[in-house]
Each structure stands twice: as C-alpha cells, then as structure tokens.
Image (cartoon, helix red, strand yellow):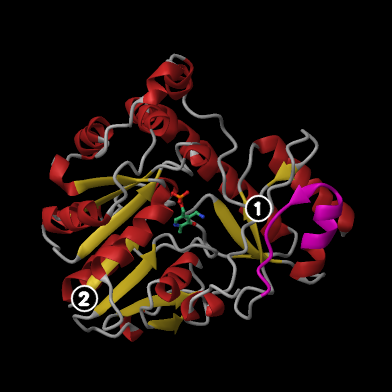
Amino acid sequence: MKFWNTMLKKLPPYVPGEQPAVTGQVIKLNTNESPFAPSPKAVRAIRSFDPRRLRLYPPPNADMLCGKIAARYGVARENVYAGNGSDEILADIFNAFASPKHLAVITDPTYTLYRTLAMRFSVPCRVIPTLPDLTIDLDAIPNKSTSTAFIANPNAQTGILIGYERLAGFITRFRGLVVIDEAYIDFAGEGTSLLPLIAKAKNLIVTRTFSKSFSLCGMRIGYAFASASLIEGLYRVKDSYNLNILSQIAAAAAIDDYAYMEKNAAVVCAERSRMTDILVRRGFAVLPSRSNFILAKPPARSARELYLSLKERGIFIRHFPVPRLKDFVRITIGARRENDALISAIADIG
Ligand code: PMP
C-alpha cells in the first residue's frame, strides 16, 4: 500500500457476485445474466471473424455499431456513444462531467458502482434512502445545477420501475445532469424508456447494455444516448480504442437480430410472473419487478440462511448483507428448468 494514494486507501474493494467454475452442475441465478445464448447471428459473426485482423486496431469510434444503434432506436449518430460495458460509460461520465465541486446523488439501494466511481473521481456523494416500500424518493434529490443524479430504472437490486411520465417530469424540472441507467429496460415493457426525451432534455444521458437482454455480458458492450454536446464530451475523455473489434462485430449482429432479443426478454418476463406467483404462494414477499430478477423476502428462514442452504445445493442466488437488503434474496430469472430446480430446492429446505 506504500504507493497508494489517499483516495485508493479509502476505496473499498468491489464485491462481485460469485462466478463458480462452470461444471454443468451449478445453477447460477446470482448476477442477472441471461439464460439464453447470444443471437445465432452474433455467434456466426464471431465464428466468421478472421483472427488475422487482430493485428489492426479496431475502429476507434465504433462507427458501424453506433450507426446501427442510431438507426434501430431512431436517433442521429451524434446522439450515440459505445463503450466497454456500461460500467466504462459510467466512469466516462464521471471523467467528463463531474468534479470535486459537483455532487453525485445516488439512491440506496442501487447499483453500487455509482458510489465507487464517486470516490474514485473524488466527487462528493449524497445518498438518498429509498422510501419504506423501497421506491426512489425523487423529491429528496437536491435540485442543483451542480448535482448529477444517477437513477437505475428499473432500479438495481429492487427491480422497481419509475413510470415514464413521473421520471420525465423530474428530469425536465431538474437543473443538474441526470443519468438514467437502463441496463434492464428491455424487461420493463413498452413505453418505459426515457430515450424519447433526449431530443428535448439536454441534461439527460440514458445508458444501456448488451449484457442482459442481448446475452453478451462476456463481451463487455455498453451504449448511451444523449444530446450531441454530451456525447461529444464523452468522446473527448474516452480511451482511444475502448471497444474491441470482436465486441463491435458481435453487438452489431445482435442489433440486426433485434427480434431474437425481444423474444428472449418476453420469455424472461413470463418466467418472472410465474416465479413471483409461486414464491408468493409459498409465503415470500416479492417486490414488483420489471427487470430480469426479483427481490424476495423469505417467510421462515433468514435470507442469509436461505442463500447459504441453496449454495450448498449448487444453486447460487445473491444476498446483500446491508441494512436495507439483508432481509431479502435477489434471484435472477433463469431458464425454466433452473427456476424449477430453485423452487424445488426451496420446498426441500422448507
Ligand atoms: N447498470 C446496472 C444497473 C447494472 O446492474 C449493471 C450490471 N451489473 C450494469 C450497469 C453494468 O453493465 P455492463 O455489463 O454493461 O457493464
């Protein structure tokens, strides 16, 4: 630690969900990955890639991919940015727009990376606790031009969605920058994305990812929508070749197969309702999720006990030992047979 700077000495290590060795025995419902393979078109694009091309740098601005994203979502190329996972884009946002004179405003609970990034970039951070029903208290966010509000919608850990009208009203009134993290939006249904607002709201960045609904988290591809000026700011700070060539090719093919993503997202949503009903019948309290996971409070055992008993049986779910979440387990919606295995293990544990 001799060479660590003051910020680094205070920075807690990130605790990722466990990634057990893939043995075929394990059921992994702990990190909100997709149970489906990537689109066959993306798989073909990766297979037909000539590795000899790897001697060349990738296109620095991922123009082909960003062009396809722009066309798909009906915006101009100048409104689109792509990065090495939306995690990198979130770091780029701090790098480009925040400073120690700013305030990062985050909710609790939410995606833990926002807080880590605020520390990394020495930006003061204000944490707004959710209301008792775990919904976000928009009215408590300080409305200042120096605030940057980070809102995951649907929210991470809870899966709760804020409806378009309410969130659009908040953004329109807000004087600072608003980052709406839509990592899970493809599971939230029609008319929920804040994307249509970017034409009007110059203080809005919408981030998205290929990690969840497009089944490509192993390739690390995120994208973002915003006004041309905000996007230009992100380009100024980005690594020269931030997105590798294979990821650019795979993501472009996945966008070309949009119907495949929609079909898979619909299956996840149907399984989410089925799992919610079953768990509620077993006495669990389940939050109304619009995401690819559910947050549930077990009736009998503690959440931690349930998590540990399932782990012993080779079923991985997530337990967050923090005040607002410690009574819950977070369960990623898996393939039907994985969900069924989870339910029978829960019945078995009793
Ligand atoms: N935002 C939220 C709310 C998330 O839950 C995650 C995934 N853990 C991410 C962003 C990161 O996504 P990516 O894989 O694109 O970095």
Mark 2 and mark 1: Cα distance apart in space: 34 Å
The spot of residue 108 in percent (x, y) is: 49, 76
How far from the left and from the top, in percent, is residue 319?
Answer: 69, 65
Q: Closer to the camera, 156 or 220?
A: 220
The three-letter code of the residue at mark 2 reads Gly
Q: Residue at x 32, y 62 (%)?
A: 180
Circle on res. 176: 2
> What residue is shown at x 30% (from left), y 62% (from top)?
93
Which residue is pictured at 26% across the width and 68% down the height?
178
* Magenta run includes residue 218: no
Judge whether 323 appears above or below 232 on screen.
below
Image mark for residue 30: 1
Residues in magenta? 307-321
Question: Residue 197: horizontal and vertical position, in percent?
Answer: 18, 57
**Secondary structure at numbered mark 1:** loop
Q: Amino acid at mark 1?
A: Asn
Q: Residue furthest front?
A: 2
Q: Which mark is residue 296?
A: none
Residue situated in front as seen by the camera: 3 or 183: 3
Characterize the local packing of mark 2: few (<14), some (14-19) or many (20 or more) Cα atoms within 10 angstroms.
some
Ligand 1 closer than 8 Å to label 1 CB = no
